[in-house]
Image (tube, rainbow, N blue to C red):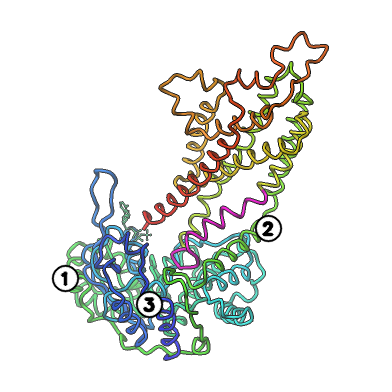
Amino acid sequence: MEALIHEAANCAEDSESGIRDKDDADVCEKPSVCFSSNSTNTNHAMFDKLLSQSPVDISFQNIVYNAALGFRKGHKKILHNINGRFPPGQLIGIMGPSGAGKSILLDILSGYRKTGVDGTVLVNGVERDLRSFRKISCYIMQDDRLQPLLTVEENLLIAADLKLPAAISREEKMKIIQQIVEILRLTDSVQTIISELSGGQKKRLSIALELINNPLVMFLDEPTTGLDGVSCNQCLRLLKQLARQGRTIICSIHQPSASMFQVLDQVYVIANGNCLYQGSPANIVQFFEDVDASCPVYHNPADYVIEVACGEYGEEVVHKMLQLMEKGKSLTYVNGAELLPELNVLKERAIEESNNDDDENLQVTSQWNQLKVLLRRSWYKMKRDRTLTYMRIFTNIFIGIMLGIIFWEIGNDASRIKDNYNMLISVMMHHISPMMLLILTFPTEMSILIKEHFNRWYSLKMYFISVTLVDIPLSVLCCIIFTSEVYYMSGQPLELLRFAMFFSICVLIVLIVQSFGLMVGAVFDVVSGNFVGPAIAIPTMMFAGFPIRVRDLPNWLYWGCYVSYLRYALEAMAAAIYGMQRGKLKCPEDADFCIIAAPSDFLDDIGIRGDQFWEDVGALILFVIVFKISAYLLLRRKIMKLR
Ligand SMILES: Nc1ncnc2c1ncn2[C@@H]1O[C@H](COP(=O)(O)OP(=O)(O)OP(=O)(O)O)[C@@H](O)[C@H]1O
């Protein structure tokens, strides 16, 4: 036991001292529930010391949750001043009918939900310090939020590289993984790709991933949902085994079978946000007798309590239960609060938190390590899902050749100067397409991000940087292929400088649309994003200088040109092709006439100066920066809002 506690203490002490949780402190609306911004280092130290003295005992007092119903629609009270105590080393089940408030209570106790919450959560009798608490706890959400393309082993190794200190060697990490895999009976599936796992295996893997850094407290939202009876029992027995190793394990369970009910050490029954029963499963029959509503013989007490909670035996019984429970203050039926967990496997696992240089971080490893591991994971994903990569390369080759054929050798043809300009517009339009990729894929990544970020795998900053960086090589490769084909086949001037200018504008357009796609993906779901993305892209095109020239726009709409990145891109492309004192274009003999042969005259005609290339590049770079920062801030806001 001491080893485990010492381990937890190390975990808290090494990386905790003096840390201010900006994230938590800034957003927290109810300082009584979470660590408020004016808490001091003394609180941290005191809290850590308490964690080092005993396993984790969680109690909560007067918890109220008000859900915001929307703008000017007020609030709905979901939890009504409830209290409770969850002793250490036990498996506790939060039960209740659907919509009773189980998930919300779990969210609040884990620290995931902060907005709209009132009341106090105590850890070992002291008001919870959310930062410290998050370091010793984990939250496994109801749906399995796993990377489907990675194998079990790859997923565990990524988790180990992110959740264990860098000082721990690969061999040691493998040993820890081996141990966890054995406990969770995943040995035969280590090389299986996640998408191929059964529901029960996925559930066990979700637990395994969070067990890597040996949390003292585990919250699980409906871990048995979607599993068959046998798997449900196995899952609960496994959780009990983990609890007996010294952990406090709290899970919500919709309606357990009689055998599952007996596995639980403690149950906490909620109905309509009120506590109906708190105590051991063995005492519930006595409790029913105490409220004159004896559980019929041969009736599963777990079913019976839910039926009572749903009002099937009248409101009077419910009222009596509420009264006897005193809003969860009564501990009469709670057994074994003093139960001493036995330590076995964990005793051998001495995981020491490294001295974290960056005290601002909740994460165990350095930012650089997080970035490296996240990029590695993206690489695995790209390797497994080659279809998309091949499709992107193929599309660029194909459309490049198509445009090359359509605009074959017109680059130096004065009679087709307008067609050449249209070719530039087509190139620009082609580079807008990657926007949809992020709008479609990012929202599905979001649920994994929320889980992993909350469980301190990595910081949002590093996640965002990895998402930004990971696509650059492929985007640049696609740009090289496409631009070379179109530029050469359409007969543009074979000058390295002009090609480099043309190519760099294409890359900048791709970077901008990707950032824009990320912004939309971070804010909207797939369906809304699919509408919003193109809906914003269309006015951006309208203000780019086609189909109407910028100088012909009405004065009151002129502002649109300043916010259209496509206008700067088109200007810069035209300058690259026709600027820098390019000589007269050839007028073919078979042409009737060439209205414009001098590139400078053409630039005049379309209202472009031709000497503003670098100004346009500056503006495009500014767009990249502003869109990237906005995407990051929107993502951060969305994650905070969810909590
Ligand atoms: N933002 C919200 N606005 C209105 N009601 C809300 C909001 N969030 C939660 N609720 C309500 O709070 C209640 C409790 O939700 P919760 O998800 O905790 O239920 P649960 O007990 O976990 O149910 P289930 O077993 O079906 O998952 C539900 O009635 C739900 O509709």
Q: Which of marks 1 and 2 is in front?
A: 2
Which residue is at the front of the view, 250 or 420? 420
Foreground pick, 524 / 320: 524
Q: How far apart are marks 1 and 2 (CA)?
A: 58 Å
Does any portion of residue 230 appear in the rendered image? no
**Image location of residue 514, percent across then percent down:** 56, 44
Q: In which quarter of the image is the C terminus?
A: bottom left
Task: Give left or right: position of 271 versus 498.
Answer: left
Question: On the image, numbered disc 1 is attached to which residue?
Answer: 323
Placement of 535 over or under 352, stated as above or below: above
In the image, is 282 to the left or to the right of 482? left
Q: Report the amino acid beneath label 3.
A: Ser
Callout 1 amino acid: Gln
Residue bearing the label numbered 3: 17
Quadrant including the N terminus: bottom left
What secondary structure is marked by label 3?
A: loop
Distance of label 3 from label 2 (alpha carbons): 42 Å
In the rendered image of this protein, does residue 470 appear above or below residue 420?
A: below
Query: Which residue type carries mark 2?
Result: Arg
Instruction: Write down the region rendered in magenta.
Output: 453-474
Which residue occupies the extreme front position in the image?
581
Q: Which residue, given by chain and number where applicable, does mark 2 sit on? A: 384
Q: Does residue 466 belong to the magenta stretch? A: yes
Using a 10 Å C-alpha cutoff, classify the residue at mark 3 as few (fewer than 14 neighbours), some (14 to 19) or many (20 or more). some
The extreme right residue here reads 589
Rate crowding at label 1 as few (under 14), some (14 to 19) or many (20 or more) other CA atoms within 10 Å: some
Residue 586 visible in rendering:
yes
Q: Which of marks 3 and 2 is nearer the N terminus?
A: 3
Q: In this view, does 263 lie above or below 376?
A: below
